[in-house]
Amino acid sequence: MADLRPYGTMRGAIRRLAVALLLLPALAGAAPLDAIFRTLETYGPLNTQRVERAALVAALQAIDPHATLVPKSRPHPAPDADVPLLHHHERWPEDIVWLQFGGLSTTASNEAITAMRDVLEPTPTGVILDLRKAGGDNLDALDAVCGLFFTNDTAIYQLRDGYANVVTTHFARANSPPPTLPPVMLLIDGDTRGASEALAAVFKRHPGVMLLGAPTRGDSAQRVFLPFSNNEDLYIGTSWIVPIESADYFPNGVIPHIPITTNISAIATNTPSPMIAPAPLSTNALPGPSLAERIGDDVVLRRAADILLGLHALRQP
């Protein structure tokens, strides 16, 4: 059975108790549990194996809500392992760069990083980083993407263990960043997860960055596979990402500056909503059929383009 003690606990005393129950199975013979078992047995045969299994899973998920036991016979791929770094990237005639991410995964190649750097030179008037539905767990890719925007000496986040001790501090891996950070619109939703969620958290604390969309998943754990038994491996968080000078985004996720919903039913029924409802670009802001056609009915992307066009207009002499 895996020894979880080196990883500490995630959230205080209740999780330390869970680890103790997991590592000291002799406690299962204590009188209170016996009394519970006897009560249950009065209503029918008690499947102790299923009870022990449920208790084990509960203890593991008290350390990490997404912990799971995986049969050794099943492949153990990394999350989003086959997702490319970029689904799409282009520079619009309005000098806005749109980068649509797939995920910060093991397939985030140097070629993709180079493509991002090329499309960002010369410095555009604005950048849209689209992290909606993006995932991955490759921290090297996260550091490299941050290096496109920040200098090499910029501390971006820390990995901390369950006792909040700093394991490592990560810095942006510079790749000839622009001399000044252009205005950045960063698009997120409830499926923004893993290293992409960490990227959103890192960018949120920097001036000149605005987040639009919906809160991200709210899962800052870095997980590994550990040998657990003869038949199973344990997939569990052993460290957690904490952005520099920023709060942990577990469990509420990274909160956008401008929440936007595409729930048309809320508008049709006149139901009050705390989020901004879909609205077309203003007539004066429409940049022409080429960009309008590219954006289509994507409400969040339209709002981001509208804001960047407005900022560019304000900077004109």
Image (cartoon, rainbow, N blue to C red):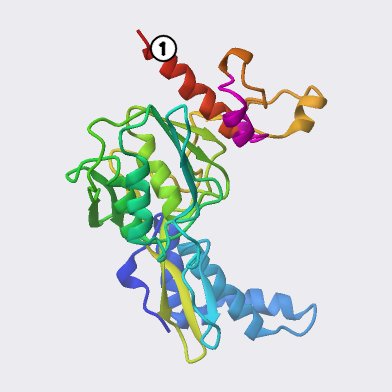
The quadrant of the image that shows the N terminus is: bottom left
Can residue 162 be seen from the camera position used here? no
**Residue 160 at x, y percent in the picture:** 30, 56
Observer-nearest of 117 and 195: 117
Say which residue appears at 25% left-offset and 56% top-offset: 165
Is residue 296 located in the magenta-colored stretch of the structure?
yes
**Residue 282 at x, y percent in the picture:** 62, 16
Say which residue appears at 55% left-offset and 77% top-offset: 31
Say which residue appears at 62% left-offset and 21% top-offset: 281
Residue lying at the far left of the rendered structure? 153
Task: From the viewer's perspective, tell me whether residue 119 is left or right of residue 51.
Answer: left
Up the image or down, 225 lies above or below 308; here it is below
Up the image or down, 31 lies above or below 169; here it is below
The quarter holding residue 15 reads bottom left
Observer-nearest of 32 and 237: 237
The amino acid type found where label 1 is placed reads: Leu
The quadrant of the image that shows the C terminus is: top left
**Magenta stretch, residue numbers:** 286-299
